[in-house]
Image (cartoon, rainbow, N blue to C red):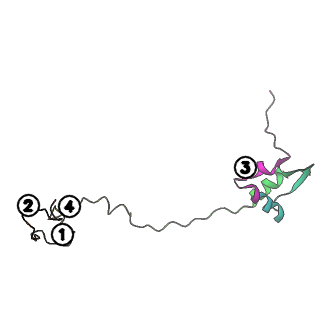
């Protein structure tokens, strides 16, 4: 039974090269100008040689990572149980004492009345 081998293209378009390399078309042209890829012209089309794409990939350095510094979880403080304030009316937050009442004319409500 014959075996099926995958065929590699001789050359691919600039757009296909950009898609293969996960970059934009302009980056492919920059790499062509630097000599990172070898290209041929077929009429008006620019074709990038597949072997040059593979050669550039082979020259890439492996990524090196340092372990990140552990920082306290910013959500840690948000997940704590919240306690009710001693004054549920919120008078302390408004800058006044809870027992402090403004003198009002009889029948009128003050701005501090809920």
Which secondary structure, mark 2? loop
Does label 1 or label 3 sit earlier along the sequence? 3
Q: Quadrant of the C terminus?
A: bottom left
Q: Which residues are magenta?
A: 1-26
Q: Quadrant of the N terminus?
A: top right
Residue 2 to residue 60: above or below:
above
The Cα atoms of the two marked residues, 2 and 1, are separated by: 25 Å
Q: Which residue is mark 1?
A: 92
The Cα atoms of the two marked residues, 4 and 3, are separated by: 55 Å
Asked whether the residues under the numbered discs 1 and 3 touch, taking CB atoms below 8 Å apart as contact, a structural biologist would say no
Q: Is residue 52 magenta?
A: no
Q: Which residue is mark 4?
A: 83
Q: Which residue is mark 2?
A: 107
Mark identifier at residue 59: none
Bin the neighbour count of mark 2 within 10 Å (Cα to Cα): few under 14, some 14-19, many 20 and up.
few
Q: Nearer the viewer, mark 2 or mark 4?
A: 2
């Amino acid at each position: 039974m014959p075996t099926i081998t995958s065929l590699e293209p001789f050359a691919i378009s600039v757009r296909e090269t950009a898609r293969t390399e996960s970059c934009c078309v302009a980056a492919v042209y920059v790499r062509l100008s630097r000599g990172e890829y070898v290209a041929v012209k077929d009429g008006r089309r620019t074709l990038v040689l597949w072997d040059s794409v593979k050669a550039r990939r082979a020259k890439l350095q492996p990524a090196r990572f340092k372990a990140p510094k552990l920082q306290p979880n910013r959500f840690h403080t948000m997940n704590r149980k919240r306690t009710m304030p001693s004054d549920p009316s919120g008078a302390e937050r408004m800058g006044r004492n809870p027992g402090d009442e403004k003198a009002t004319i009889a029948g009128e409500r003050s701005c501090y009345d809920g």
